[in-house]
Image: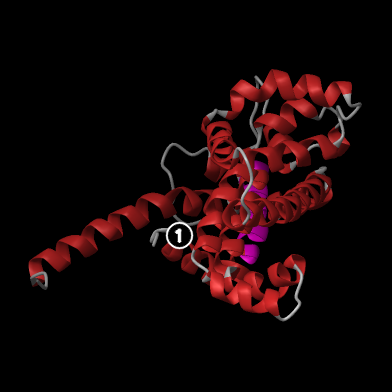
Amino acid sequence: MRPSLGQRLLIYAILLMLVLVYISPIYWTLITSFKKLPEMMASTPTFFPEDATLQHYRDVLYESRYTTFMRNSIVVGVAATVLTLLLSVGAAYSLSRLRFRGKTLFSLGILLVYLFPGILLIIPLFRVMANLGLYDNIISVVLVHVILALPFGIWTLRSFFDGVPVELEDAARIDGASRLRVLAQIFTPLIAPGIATVAIFSFVVSWNDYLFPAILLSSPSNQTVPVGIAGWTSAYSINWGQISAASILTVVPVIFFFGLVGRYFVQGLAAGAVKE
């Protein structure tokens, strides 16, 4: 039954309110990054900069360690995403196509790890990384982010592998193709939406994480963007202009990455929602 005009207007009004709720913090951060300090601290807020300035962006890019933080975040995010994809594809294919003892128990164990909140893993992971000599090394953060994203990646891609007809793999195997070749040339194009979904999830988890970089990294030259920006606050002052400018700059790589694979991400969410 088609909704009436009043029902459609109500739906549109609710959706518009939700959009405003999500966009308003970003908009406020954006206009704050262009305001001068007196206007920023005025008792009456302005919803558009009266005397716009780029000084905060210049301070962030040329007078701070922001570029170092950004470089570290990009390295950690890309490395964690690539490793998560490689491990997720192999593990998901094994759980979907191979038969081995303990398969069900192993699958449930992966899901159980995903259910644990990250804060419970701080002390064990810190001790492991310290014993491996990886404390204050961005490699430790990469490994932790892979651990956090891997269960989601395996379970997501497994559903995509289950949706590919077995006859395709059997035909390729009869023609002499190895499992690795079947995985690379047949499965990978078919599960591209799932791969994009896992890639975006892994990158965003790594990009936004503050907890583990703050615990595992101590040198300013190794810190990521969330930890570096948090260091600009103190008990006596908060530089809202620089923090706002840095926050806007930090969103740009995520938007660019989502623009590259965003359409596959939407397809992946739609496909993952339906299980045959």
Query: Where are the magenta residues, as a range?
Result: 242-257
Q: Is residue 40 left or right of residue 15?
A: right
Q: 10 Å neighbourhood of mark 1: few (<14), some, or many (≥20)?
A: some
Instruction: Report the residue marked by disc 1.
Output: 272
Quadrant, the C terminus? bottom left
Residue 206 appears in which quarter of the rendering? top right
For the residue pair 23 and 86, the one nearer the viewer reads as 86
Please tell me in which quadrant of the rendered image residue 102 appears: top right
According to the image, what is the colour scheme of the structure? Answer: secondary structure
Q: Is residue 238 visible?
A: yes
Q: Is any part of residue 208 visible from this angle?
A: no
Q: Is residue 111 magenta?
A: no
Question: Most prominent secondary structure in the magenta stretch?
Answer: helix
Residue at (24, 56) in percent of width and height: 14
Which picture quadrant has residue 275? Answer: bottom left
Q: Residue furthest bottom?
A: 175
